[in-house]
Amino acid sequence: MKYLYPAFFRRLTSGGYSVDFPDLPGCISAGDTLDEALSMAREALSLHLFGMLEDGETLPVASDPSSVPPEQGSFISPVEGRPEMVRDEIKNRSVKKTLTIPYWLNEAAEKENINFSQVLQEALKERIEV
C-alpha cells in the first residue's frame, strides 16, 4: 500500500534541500539536489511509516497539501511512502549465523563444493515446512 503525505522542501543556504513532513514530526530528510532530496524523502517516509506500523501506532491522516499553510522559503509537494517495501527488505536480508559441525563433515562437504548457506536454508525450510 502506498501513502501520500505533504512535505516541506526548503532550499538551504549552504546548498541542497531539507525535507520535513508536517503530519509526521521527526520525519526529516535532505539531499544535495532536488532529485536526491525527493528520493531521500521517500525513503525517510517509508521508514517512518514502517516504524509506526511495527509499533502498533495509528498512522495520521495525511493533510491535503492545499490546506497546509506555506512557510517562507519553502514549497510543498506530496511524497509517496511504501512501508511494505521496507518490511520486505528487512525480512529478506541475510543474517550471518555461526555454527559448528564435525571436522570430517566439513572436509567432505568442501570436497563436494557444497554451498553451506544454501543447504542450511533448504534444510530449515523443509524442517519448518515453508
Image: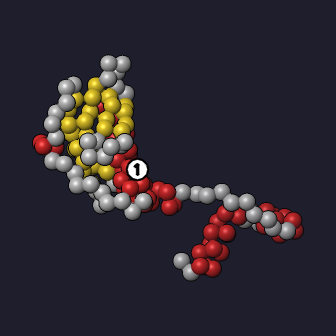
Please give the name of the residue rendered at 31% of the width and 46% of the height, measured from the top-left corner.
Answer: 24
Q: Which residue in the structure is indicated by mark 1?
A: 47
Please give the name of the residue rendered at 19% of the width and 30% of the height, measured from the top-left corner.
Answer: 71
Residue nearer the viewer, 109 or 18? 18
Is 23 placed above or below 2 here? above
In the rendered image, the quadrant that contains the N terminus is bottom left
Residue 25 visible, this orientation: yes
Q: Amino acid type of disc 1?
A: Leu
Residue nearer the viewer, 98 or 26? 26
In the rendered image, the quadrant that contains the C terminus is bottom right
Is disc 1 placed on a helix, strand or loop?
A: helix
Q: Position of residue 88 (x, y in %)?
A: 44, 60
Residue 108 visible, this orientation: no
Please give the name of the residue rendered at 66% of the width and 57% of the height, measured from the top-left corner.
Answer: 96
Q: Position of residue 66 (x, y in %)?
A: 12, 42
Judged left or right of residue 104, residue 129 is left
Judged left or right of residue 39, residue 110 is right
